[in-house]
Image: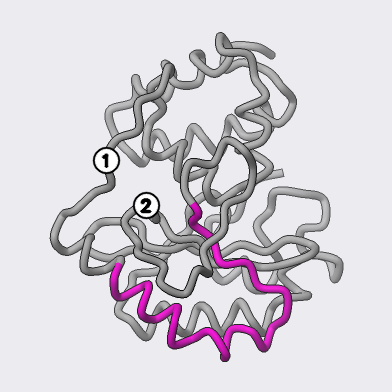
Amino acid sequence: MAMISNVEDFFVKGCGRCERFATPDCSTQKWQTGLIELRRICLSMDLEEVVKWGQPCYTFAGRNIVILGAFREEFLISFMNAALLKDPEGLLQKRGANVQHAHMIPLKANDQVEKLTPVMRAYIEEAKGYAKAGVKPPKIERDIELPDELIEAMDADPELAEAFHALTPGRQRSYAFNLNSAKKSATRVSRIAKFRNKIIAGKGAMER
């Protein structure tokens, strides 16, 4: 099953990553009202809307700012480069032991978006300021140098992150080598989408 490439499909059909795609059981249907409100907030703040990893991603000054996601028990807005955010309200959470920084605001009711709108707008405005100024979080030293696109994809996709970190170091290196060999960011993003099922299956980049 292929991930969506048209952002409108996300709000109507889902991300395309599982068999619930385009069915009433898709998580986007349960949280559609809240997701559409999150979308409205992002677009009202002059963010550009694109699709990355099968989900709506919102950019500013050439940088990814936030990405939306939907799961059975919750929907969320995830902040890229979240290590820079001050998070005065203590809303940002991280999922999984391998996630370095709290970066997502999980929502468990559609009407939560309205209540948290002022805070989310403030966080987005802060993130835009860093993007405009070209400020980036400090690089984290890793045994395996992972491309930014893979780190962002895992931030947006907890299932992918869990599966990748469960791989052997050799398999992790196979993906890092393959992705780092691509000169263009768009190529790396495309490869990550193609690799997702193999990563979930516990395979390396060159395994069938």
Residue 177 located left or right of residue 91: left
**Main SS of the magenta segment?**
helix
The residue most toward the left is 133
Q: 195 or 146: nearer the eye? A: 146
- Judged from the image, the secondary structure of the residue bearing numbered disc 2 is helix
Residue 145 located left or right of residue 91: left
Residue 71 drawn above or below residue 136: below
Res. 138 mark: 1
- Judged from the image, the secondary structure of the residue bearing numbered disc 1 is loop
Q: Is residue 86 magenta?
A: no
The span shown in magenta is 102-126
Three-letter amino acid code at the position of disc 1: Pro
Q: How many marks?
A: 2
Q: In the image, residue 198 lies at what x, y percent? A: 67, 26
Res. 4 mark: none
Point out the image quarter for the N terminus: top right
Residue 179 placement: quadrant:
top left
Q: Which residue sits at x=53%, y=56%? A: 5
* Proximity of marks 2 and 1: CB atoms separated by less than 8 Å: yes
- Decide: few, some or many residues near mark 2? Use Cα within 10 Å; few <14, some 14-19, many ≥20: some
- Decide: few, some or many residues near mark 1? Use Cα within 10 Å; few <14, some 14-19, many ≥20: few
How far apart are the two marked residues, 2 and 1, measured between alpha carbons?
8 Å
Q: In the image, residue 8 lies at what x, y percent? A: 56, 71
Residue 151 located left or right of residue 136: right
Q: Which residue sits at x=64%, y=43%? A: 96
Q: Earlier in the sequence, mark 2 or mark 1?
A: 2
Q: In the image, residue 163 lies at what x, y percent? A: 68, 31
Would you name the residue on which mark 2 appears?
Answer: 83
Residue 36 placement: quadrant:
bottom right
